Amino acid sequence: MAKAGVDAFLVPRSDAHMGEYVSPRDERLAWLTGFTGSAGFAAILQGEAGVFVDGRYTLQVREQVDLAHFTPVGWPKTTAADWLADRLEDGQFLAIDPWLHTSAEVEKLRDRLEPRGVTLRSGENLVDAIWDDQPEPALGKAHSQPDDLAGESSASKRHRLGKTLAEAEQSAAVLTLPDSISWLLNIRGTDIPRNPVVQAFAVLHTSGVVDLYVDSRKLAEVTLDDDVTVHDPADFVPSLAALAGPVRVDRSTAPYALKELLEGAGIEVAWGADPCILPKARKNPVEIASTREAHLRDAAAMVEFLTWLEREAPDGGLTEIEVVKALEGFRRATNALQDISFDTISGAGAHGAIVHYRVTEETNAPVEPGTLLLVDSGGQYVDGTTDITRTIAIGPPGVDEKRAFTRVLQGMIAISRARWPKGLAGRDLDALARAPLWMDGRDYDHGTGHGVGVFLNVHEGPQRLARISEVPLEPGMILSNEPGYYKEGAFGIRIENLIVVEHAPELPGGDDREQLCFTTLTWVPIDRRLIDVTLLSGEERAWLDAYHAEIPRLIGARLSDAAQAWVKDACQPI
């Protein structure tokens, strides 16, 4: 920093493709600070360094960073711009790598800091300058996603979206998100752990033609249409100068460097959403049917795991790592698992209160009788992506644990049963999941639900169930439904199903306005030992009994004899 003449440098957890997930080469935040969460950033000054994390990582960050050198900062309550504005002075310089920040982020920084006389510089990455053993770029093999699973050919997608660009009087769109490019071209890859995407850049033209900038070695097993031309990644930046404007760039997901390069070449930038974002989120009937099958397969594996856990846990000989290995083993026994969809969260007792806890050999705790075990996991299958959380009582639960669990369950049921007028967003429904907890003076610091792909990212935008989500929910969108409660130092509770938005059936006496609802995709028993039945309403009991009644019918034939016996008992009416 001193050599570069800068007073502050931002280190985000991102890469040039601006996806949530990064390859080992781009784990700069973890390398520098020790923090391994999936979201966050650091602001480095000469005498102070802040690590910014949201409510999911409040406990984790304090365990992972050296507090003598790094100060955890609650984000987004405190923004980078505000924190830096309090510390930088007139005439000082803030540096960023323009490939690791979006234009929206840079604009917020400039709006806050430039009136104070702080200058923002974009240039080299100062972490890369000192990271001597930085891994090489990802070079995972890609493969084609069959049209009978994608539900639409790549050619159809490209021409459909090219037409939308033409209607907007835009000549092309620059695509940077790996899941957008993978969806558009019906390809999948192995560049990012747990996420079957191909890291690349692409330019979609109004004609439906795509210029794809990717290491061709990744595509050895892929046959692309003639309208898709593969270029060396080194040609991407020079090629931008040859585009004719206006060129669509997504202000919220594309790196700021694109704005600098296009405007520097005199090309008009047309700000607009990545054209793949919403079409990808609106799953077609084939994708929904295939993901239902993936969820039933995964549910059977989960029930086999819960049967095993019921047999092994009471003796107190299990550890968190053994739980992780056993669960992955049951998924692999399906002979259909491509990968787990994220690193399994297996949190026993107090570890369950760490929202995104990842067990290591150093933290590996016993699963002891009298505690709660929170297991959040998922699988990647060629026909779908799963994500499920169950909280299990290991021995008799306490009164507080049962009450908190029941309040969380009530919130999950409220979302599951919701119906609403078309046009509402996730922010309009989020409070339904929290209201039962609010009645007890409790809450949780993460969103209620995130979007989920189909054999793509387990976290997918733009749909969310969260206070900040303004994107209207539409039929075909898949989301998680996962309220929780976390008592630091004691226990954590989360119950998570995946749900899909559908048109709601008409009701007698209703008006003619269109309404939407959720349909459940996840079919795994909820631990009845943790339910305080006296807190449930008649409608909540009816929903839970109906949910449990469906499970043996849907997955019974897929189960071993032992699991069939276990699920029959686990799904008894309350």
Image (cartoon, rainbow, N blue to C red):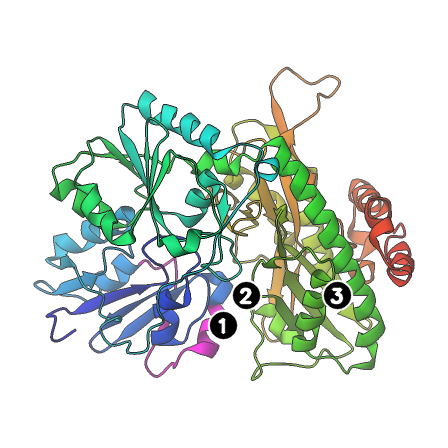
Q: Secondary structure at mark 2?
A: loop
- Image quadrant assignment for residue 162: top left
Pick the quarter of the image with the N terminus: bottom left
| Camera-nearest residue between 132 and 419 | 132
Residue ID at (30%, 42%): 251
Q: Position of residue 217 (x, y in %)?
A: 39, 56
Please give the residue where the numbered disc 1 appears in the rendered image.
60
Report the span colored magenta. 58-79
How would you rate the neighbour count of disc 3 (Cα within 10 Å): few for under 14, some for 14-19, many for 20 or more? many
**Which dot marks residue 392?**
3
Tags 2 and 1 in contact by the CB under 8 Å rule? yes
Q: Earlier in the sequence, mark 1 or mark 3?
A: 1
Instruction: Look at label 3 and name its amino acid.
Output: Ile
Instruction: Look at label 2 and name its amino acid.
Output: His
How would you rate the neighbour count of disc 1 (Cα within 10 Å): few for under 14, some for 14-19, many for 20 or more? many
Q: Earlier in the sequence, mark 2 or mark 3?
A: 2
Q: Earlier in the sequence, mark 2 or mark 1?
A: 1
Q: Secondary structure at mark 1?
A: helix
How would you rate the neighbour count of disc 2 (Cα within 10 Å): few for under 14, some for 14-19, many for 20 or more? many
Please give the residue where the numbered disc 2 appears in the rendered image.
356
Structural distance between the alpha carbons of marks 2 and 1: 8 Å
